[in-house]
Image: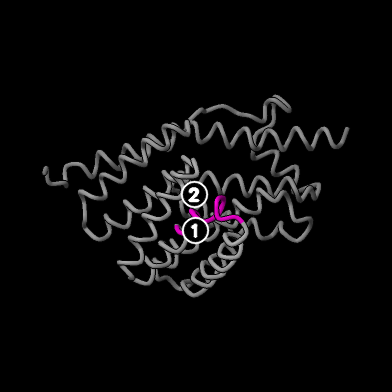
Amino acid sequence: RCNQIMLIKNMSILYQLTLDLMGFNHNAFSLYHPGMSEETCFADAHQHNHIAICRLICVKRKYVAFWMGSMDTAAKMCKLHKKYCNASSGRLVSIINSSFVDGMIALYFARKHGDDEEEWTALGESTIQTWSRWAECSSWNFVNKLNLLEAEYAFLKKEDGTAIAKYDASIKAARDHKFNHEEGLAEEKAATYLLHMSRHNEALAHFKNAKKCYEKWGAAALVERVETAISVLSPLCVCP
């Protein structure tokens, strides 16, 4: 019975993640108990030292915050998640996704050049090293994400030629391997870089491509967010 309860809670967390990305304002935890929410589930798990549940909720919150562009929340969850990583290792797929998101968060905040730049840069560099090893084992699954991490690192180091090449490589690999969501992410990150370089027309094209990818993925919340960026950027572009 205990295993069944844990399984239902895990399924509720992952279902809530899906609902959040799809833009549905529903409480997945009501499937387990009518009065339960993500917050009360986390509080209960923390109180009873259910490390696996606490860890998964942190990963879920970090993942959703990252994809929604709420980077301060993503960074907070990145740090909180580490408090629950000393027990069992967790599911491999969770470790892989969490590692990639951690690296992307780290390189984003390293570019802010704050007091913690050295810490974030070190995390970004160690993540790239890890993904380089993984890509050697399975290029199909990992190379597009490695390319994107390397593109963000080149962005940090102001290496324009490398950044553009790596963004393009990430987009192509994700498209070739049918990872619609990660193709969209690479398109969006390329757009952000080009916007930083005041290359507005190129940035707009990448944002529009990102929107198409997120539509294929079924993530309506991400589509809405990118549409906002497109509406803001469009007046700044020069018609060919």
> What is the magenta range?
138-147
| x then y, percent, for residue 116 | 49, 71
| x then y, percent, for residue 97 | 59, 51
Task: Please report contact status of discs 1 and 2: CB closer than 8 Å, yes or no.
Answer: yes
Which image quarter holds the N terminus? top right
- Report the residue that reaches farthest toward the right: 1
Residue name at image x 62 percent, y 53 percent: 96
How busy is the neighbourhood of tag 2: few (under 14 within 10 Å), some, or many (20 plus)?
A: many
Residue 110 appears in which quarter of the rendering? bottom left
Foreground residue among 122 and 181: 181
How busy is the neighbourhood of tag 1: few (under 14 within 10 Å), some, or many (20 plus)?
A: many
192 magenta-colored: no
Residue name at image x 57 percent, y 59 percent: 135
Residue name at image x 43 percent, y 45 percent: 183
Magenta part, dominant SS:
helix
Foreground residue among 198 and 225: 198
| x then y, percent, for residue 146 | 50, 59
> Against 156, is 94 above or below?
above
146 magenta-colored: yes
- The amino acid pointed to by label 1 is Ile
> Against 199, is 118 above or below?
below
Q: Which residue is mark 1?
A: 105
> Against 238, is 26 above or below?
above
Name the side, left or right, on which 204 lies relative to 33: left
Q: CA distance from mark 1 to mark 2?
A: 7 Å
Q: Which residue is mark 2?
A: 66
Name the side, left or right, on which 155 lies relative to 39: left
- The amino acid pointed to by label 2 is Phe
* Nearer-N-terminus badge (1/2): 2
Foreground residue among 111 and 168: 168
| x then y, percent, for residue 132 | 56, 65
Q: Secondary structure at mark 1?
A: helix
